[in-house]
Amino acid sequence: MATKTNLLFLMFTTTLLLANGDPQVPCYFIFGDSLMDNGNNNRLLTEAKVDFPPYGIDFADGPTGRFSNGRNSADIIAQLLGFDNFIPPFATAKGGDILNGVNYASGAAGIRDETAQHLVHFMS
């Protein structure tokens, strides 16, 4: 058991050492579902929204549309890659925002037409 703990500690400290604050890549584009969404659903006609408490209770900006109580995995990866700010959602990105990347992830996203069909209100 001690060996597994030591290995986990070594991996964690190595990750911290590699994340030295210098950008490791010029930009970061994110595609995914609710695991990566950071606010793209806020203005959509869908029931898959989380821009209200208790979502975001541990996030500095409060509820932002992340399907978590704080940072999501895309935020953590952006920090490890050395970005100064979180990657903005596509829905609110403007002009120069896209130079560092954009988050296209959307909660209830799916490949098949039947995926989350009950959550989305299509406009015709």
Image (cartoon, rainbow, N blue to C red):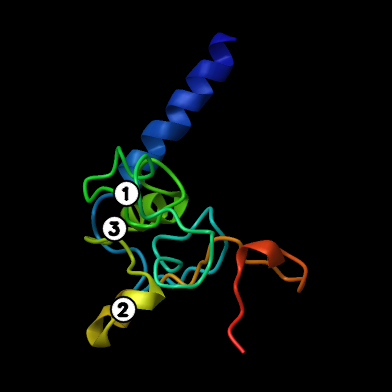
- Mark 3, secondary structure of its residue: loop
Residue 23: image quadrant is: bottom left
Say left or right for 9 vs 20: right
| Residue in view at x 38 percent, y 76 percent | 91
At 41% across and 70% down in the image, what residue appears?
28
With respect to residue 66, does 88 lie above or below? below
The secondary structure type at the circle numbered 2 is: loop
The quadrant of the image that shows the N terminus is: top right
Sequence-earlier tag: 1 or 3: 1
Marks 1 and 3: CB-CB under 8 Å? yes
Q: Judging from the image, what secondary structure is the residue with disc 1 in? A: loop
Tag 2 near tag 1, CB within 8 Å: no
The residue tagged 3 is 82
Query: Which quadrant would the C terminus be assigned to in this image?
Result: bottom right
- Sort mark 3 into few (<14), some (14-19) or many (20+) by Cα contacts within 10 Å: some
* Separation of marks 1 and 3 at Cα, in angstroms: 6 Å
* Residue named by callout 1: 19
**Residue nearest the viewer, comparing 91 with 104:** 91
